[in-house]
Amino acid sequence: MKYQIVGEPLPVAICDVNAGETLITERGSMSWMTPNMQMDTTATGGLGGALGRMFSGESIFQNRYTAQGGPGQIAFASSFPGSIRAFSILPGQEMIVQKSGFLASEAGVTLSVAFQKRLGAGFFGGEGFIMQKLSGQGVAFVEIDGYACEYELAAGQSMIVDTGYLAAMTASCTMDIVTVPGVKNMVFGGEGVFNTVVTGPGKIILQTMPISAVAGCLRPYFPANNNK
């Protein structure tokens, strides 16, 4: 497969595939394709895999697109202004991504649920108790909300991240939560009560415009729903 990612801040991943080559997507993210791309919807991974995808924010079913009779092209567009990043997934080089961050991948990539090792990180860390784990082998495309900033953390090195700004990290990183110090800071600081702490070794990708933050900014401008 050859691909190009174009069009930021409204990006699309355009993939040129060989005959017989298959790409998968979870949310019907196909935007356009050549007529020889055959679609097949299946619950890959059995009941356990399907339920895992559901709990991680994805559909139970996967759409598989295979080039028939010759090379084909298929494009997957982002659902929100921002970035699309391509990650090479290999055994021992798995990625953990935010819920609904997975866009599409080669057929050798497996999408599963990733429970946080510490309960505190799950319930209060802003990324939810469940994230998505990309394993197997192949190229995976991940959506980033806004601009993507990458940091390489050494062993024991940490970054404090506000709620929702962690888009992805290598599976070697760990997450935990800390409370904002001081009651005055919690109440009047406007930064919430908890922050997420990500510790290396590994790479983290932070995003500048989480959907949750955008929704919070727009909420005051929506008319109240007056039920009569």
Image: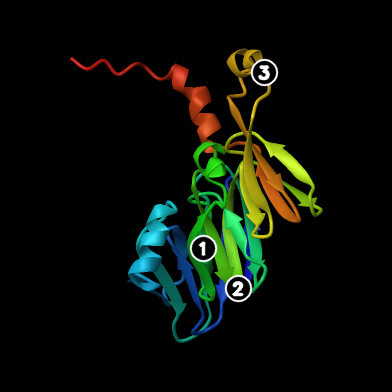
- Measured from the top left, where is residue 15 in percent x and y? 57, 68
Residue tagged 1? 104
Q: Is residue 124 visible?
A: yes
- Measured from the top left, where is residue 14 in percent x and y? 57, 63
Callout 1 crowding tier (Cα within 10 Å): few <14, some 14–19, many ≥20:
many
Q: Nearer the viewer, mark 3 or mark 2?
A: 3
Residue tagged 3? 182
Residue at (50% x, 43% y) in the render: 128
Q: Nearer the viewer, mark 1 or mark 2?
A: 2
Residue 219 vs residue 12, the one in the foreground: 219
Marked residue nearer the N-terminal end (1 or 2):
1
Residue 65 vs residue 93, the one in the foreground: 93
- The answer for how far apart the CA atoms under marks 3 and 2 are is 46 Å
Residue 172 vs residue 28, the one in the foreground: 172
When asked about the image quadrant of residue 163, the answer is top right
Above or below — where is 14 with respect to 150? below
Query: Which mark identifies residue 175?
Result: none
Q: Dot 1: what SS? A: strand
Residue at (65% x, 63% y) in the render: 87
